[in-house]
Image (cartoon, rainbow, N blue to C red):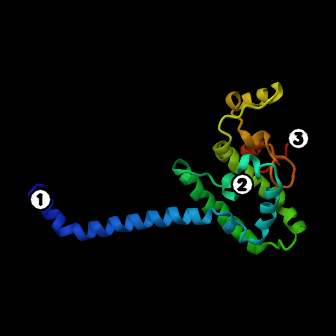
Amino acid sequence: MPGGLRQYFRQHGGALLLGAAGAVALLVALFGGEAALSTTEFCVGCHSMRYPAEELKKSSHYGALGANPGCKDCHIPQGLANFHLAVATHVIDGARELFLEFRNDYSDIKKFDARRPEMAHDARMNLKRWDSVTCRACHKDPQPPGADARAAHEKMRTQQATCIDCHQNLVHKEVPETDLDASLAQGRRVERKD
């Protein structure tokens, strides 16, 4: 080690070690915090989220192929490549929903259902923006049976469609479907016209 570098480490080694330890502690807190906030137990800690959690357990997605997905599997992108999306989801959506939890009365399902279309739209828009990355985590290369379904899936390659464009109302109680492209263009919820 050259003398100047040795001298520098003697003078600043403590600060460098402290900085490195702080960076490691920050990363552990960030990744650990994200993991803790992504559990179904945390999500259903808010009274209102118990309704959709119960709906999930009754859906075809629960128990299919031996898998029991939780909230994060559909609503929070996983993996290091999507970590920025997970953090943004917790900060933006989590903070908004926590605020709304305190602001609104969800003491029964009817009161929850009054806000359900708005919440479904927000979740659908996330999936649209993420190119349905959470769907694709499990459904790697869907090969649907039937010519109509295969033609519809071709839209994902030719028309920039994504899973949620066609697959709405799969897990939770049905609400009017959203025209996601029009909603993105107009910056507001636009219901699909059939």
What residue occupies the far front of the structure in this picture? 66
Q: Mark 3 or 2 closer to N-term? A: 2
Secondary-structure class at tag 1: helix
Amino acid found under the numbered disc labelled 2: Asn
User: What residue appears at the point 72 percent right and 54 percent down from the top-left corner?
Assistant: 68
Residue 148 sits in quarter: top right
Q: Quadrant of residue 39?
A: bottom right
Residue 170, given in percent of the width and then of the height, sits at: 81, 48
Q: On the image, numbered disc 2 is attached to which residue? A: 68
Q: Is residue 88 above or below residue 29?
A: above
Given the current orientation, which residue lies at the most extreme top position? 147
Mark 3 surroundings: few (<14), some (14-19) or many (≥20) residues within 10 A: few
Image position, residue 16 (x, y; %): 27, 66
In the picture, the disc for residue 193 is 3
Q: Which mark is residue 4?
A: 1
First of labels 1, 2 by sequence position? 1
Q: Which residue shows up at 84% across the image and 46% down it?
A: 177
Residue 27: % across, % down: 45, 62
Q: Residues within 10 Å of mark 1 (few under 14, many from 20)?
A: few
The earlier-in-sequence mark between 3 and 1 is 1
Q: Are marks 3 and 2 in contact (CB under 8 Å)?
A: no
Distance from the alpha carbon under mark 3 to that under mark 1: 72 Å
Q: Residue at x 24, y 71 (%)?
A: 14
Q: Quadrant of the N terminus?
A: bottom left
Q: Amino acid at mark 1?
A: Gly
Q: Tell me if mark 2 has few (under 14), some (14-19) or many (20+) residues whose alpha carbon lies within 10 angstroms of its own.
A: few
Distance from the alpha carbon under mark 1 to that under mark 2? 59 Å
Amino acid type for the residue under numbered disc 3: Lys
